[in-house]
Image (cartoon, helix red, strand yellow):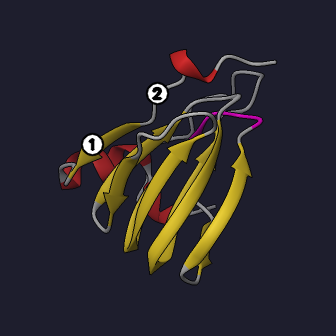
Amino acid sequence: MADNNNLRIVVERNPSESKLSELNIKCWPKWGCSPGKYQLKFDAEETCYLLKGKVRAYPKGSSEFVEFGAGDLVIIPKGLSCTWDVSVAVDKHYKFESSSPSPTPPSSSSCQ
């Protein structure tokens, strides 16, 4: 059984515009969900930027939660199982880390 104790969700509140453009977030795919509870397992590290919403993420086996919402940049570690308690519908950009290193795309404001 995987040990969730070392898996921490990292939340960066209101990252700078320069950081967001450096990450090219506007080109990432989008995902959304309505309020409710969702059991999620992350098989790859996910970085996401919430455009809308409010979430409490409860790691499996823990009564503690991490709260994040609109304007937050969130990194969810590979291997984490958690329950998302969504109180305000979520709209987010997201990106999964691939296991193979990808070449750095040319810095450009347009999406491929």
Where is residue 52 drawn, in percent x and y?
Answer: 38, 76
Q: Is residue 46 magenta?
A: yes
Against 77, residue 108 (above or below) is below
**Residue in view at x 22 percent, y 49 percent:** 15
Give the amino acid type for the residue marked by disc 2 in the picture: Arg
Residue bounds of the magenta highlight: 43-48
Q: Position of residue 66 (x, y in %)?
A: 38, 45
Q: Secondary structure at mark 2?
A: loop
Asked which quadrant contains residue 50, the reply is bottom left
Crowding at label 2, few (<14), some or many (≥20) Cα neighbours within 10 Å? some
Residue 72 lies in the magenta-colored region: no
Query: Which residue is found at the position 67% from the left and 16% from the top?
Result: 3
**Residue 36 position within the rendered picture, expressed as x and y whole percent measured from the top left:** 59, 77
Taking the image as shown, residue 51 lies to the left or right of residue 89, namely left
Rendered-image quadrant of the N terminus: top right
- Residue 35 higher or lower than 101, as above or below: below
Q: In this view of the protein, can residue 88 be seen by the observer?
A: yes
Question: Along the line of sight, which residue is nearer the eye, 94 or 36?
Answer: 36
Task: Return the mark for residue 8.
Answer: 2
Depicted 58 relative to depicted 3: above or below: below
Pick the front one: 16 or 111: 16
Q: Nearer the viewer, residue 3 or 49?
A: 3
